[in-house]
Image (cartoon, rainbow, N blue to C red):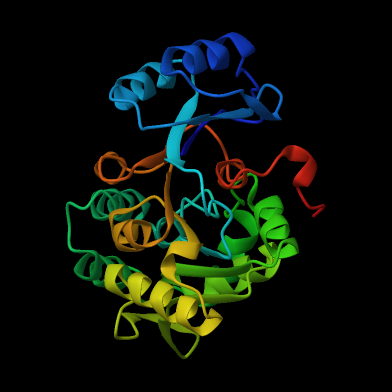
């Protein structure tokens, strides 16, 4: 048995009953359940429809996301999340680079690296090198003035933890940022790269080994083992090429507002919903959301 989930941005609740019922009828699905009126609905299916991706494409023009997944085991015990452009709306290295006067150049490298066009580790070393001599105090300034949370993050964490879940923030960014974001959102742990600092300034180097694609997979494996669960009991979310390994290994891998090459390799793509989409995909109703 499978479950088809339709959802959209909670700020623009435009999922109508006609759309849901039309698709349910076309696919011969069971009764639709509204997880949140105007925002998310689901219905059971006996098989994955042959025209799934054609329908997905058509719904994108309506700003509606569609996912079909196995019905059993949807509620997960582990959330493992990327940070940049996932739990926050920015790329922290791009924001630091803007303060260093090389914002556009670094942002271009970041975009190519996240789309899988460049080796992640070499691209990170190159970008960090351009931050040399930036005062350490700029980090706190960027966190305060430039970083904003992705909508839905707090309720995602609160709801999963209220239901016995564990949350890990695993980023190719920097510990100076993940420590703060983890604290604000309620993550149980965080892993990231460390910017090297000497005499109050960035040295232009990052501690080795770099936490990249393989390290994210390793983190998922290690944390799952420590919790006594398998990776299939995890839901992972990310947007970049360096997230593909953990997205593929987790029981549910969600490409959230992801780069084109990343979307092409993921079966669950959320382009319009926010982070609460991860709750709807697990079968949570709005009434199940924990206060935060």
Q: Is residue 163 above or below residue 67?
A: below
At a point 62% along the width and 46% down the height, the residue shown is 279
Quadrant of the rendered image containing residue 141 = bottom right
Is residue 83 something one can see in this rendering? no
User: Is 36 on the left-hand or right-hand side of 66?
Assistant: right
Q: Is residue 78 above or below residue 41?
A: below
Nearest the viewer among 115 and 148 is 115
Residue 220 is drawn in which quadrant? bottom left
Q: Confirm whether residue 234 shows in the render.
A: yes
Residue occupying the point 50% across, 64% down: 233
Which residue is most to the right?
Answer: 291
Q: Is residue 140 above or below residue 265?
A: below
Relative to 91, 182 lies left or right: right
Q: Residue at x 46, y 18 (%)?
A: 28
Residue drawn at (54%, 70%), measured in percent from left and top? 168
Q: Nearer the viewer, residue 262 or 33?
A: 33
Q: Is 205 on the left-hand or right-hand side of 156?
A: left
Q: Position of residue 241 (x, y in %)?
A: 28, 55
The outermost residue toward the bottom is 199
- x and y percentages locating residue 275 in the rendered image: 58, 46
Q: Quadrant of residue 38?
A: top right
Q: Where does residue 291 sit, x and y in percent of width and height? A: 82, 52
- In screen coordinates, is 27 left or right of 273? left
Residue 34 image position (x, y, % from top left): 68, 27
The number of numbered badges drawn on the structure is 0
Query: Can you say whether 81 is above or below 60 in the image?
Result: below
Q: Quadrant of the C terminus?
A: bottom right
């Amino acid at each position: 048995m499978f479950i088809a989930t339709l959802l959209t941005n909670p700020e623009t609740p435009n999922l109508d009953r006609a759309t849901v019922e039309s698709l349910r009828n076309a696919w011969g699905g069971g009764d639709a359940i509204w997880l949140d009126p105007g925002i998310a609905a689901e219905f059971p299916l006996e098989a994955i429809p042959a025209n799934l991706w054609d329908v997905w494409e058509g719904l994108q023009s309506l700003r509606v996301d569609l996912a079909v997944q196995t019905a059993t085991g949807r509620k997960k015990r582990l959330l493992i999340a990327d940070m940049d452009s996932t739990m926050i709306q920015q790329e922290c290295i791009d924001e630091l680079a803007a303060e260093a006067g090389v914002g556009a150049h670094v942002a271009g490298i970041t975009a190519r690296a996240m789309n899988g066009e460049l080796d992640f580790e070499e691209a990170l070393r190159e970008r960090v090198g351009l931050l040399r001599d930036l005062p350490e105090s700029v980090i706190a300034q960027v966190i305060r003035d430039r970083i904003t949370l992705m909508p839905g993050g707090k309720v995602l964490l609160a709801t999963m933890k209220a239901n016995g879940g564990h949350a890990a923030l695993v980023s190719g960014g920097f510990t100076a940022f993940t420590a703060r974001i983890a604290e604000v959102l309620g993550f149980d742990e965080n892993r990231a790269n460390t910017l090297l600092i000497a005499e109050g300034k960035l040295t232009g180097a990052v501690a080795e080994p770099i936490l990249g694609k393989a390290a994210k997979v390793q983190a998922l494996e290690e944390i799952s083992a420590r919790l006594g669960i398998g990776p299939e009991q995890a839901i992972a979310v990310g947007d970049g090429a360096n997230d593909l390994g953990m997205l593929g290994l987790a029981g549910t891998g969600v490409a959230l507002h992801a780069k084109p090459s990343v979307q092409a390799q993921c079966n669950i793509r959320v382009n319009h919903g926010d982070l609460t989409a991860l709750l709807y995909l697990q079968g949570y109703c709005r009434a199940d959301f924990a206060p935060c």
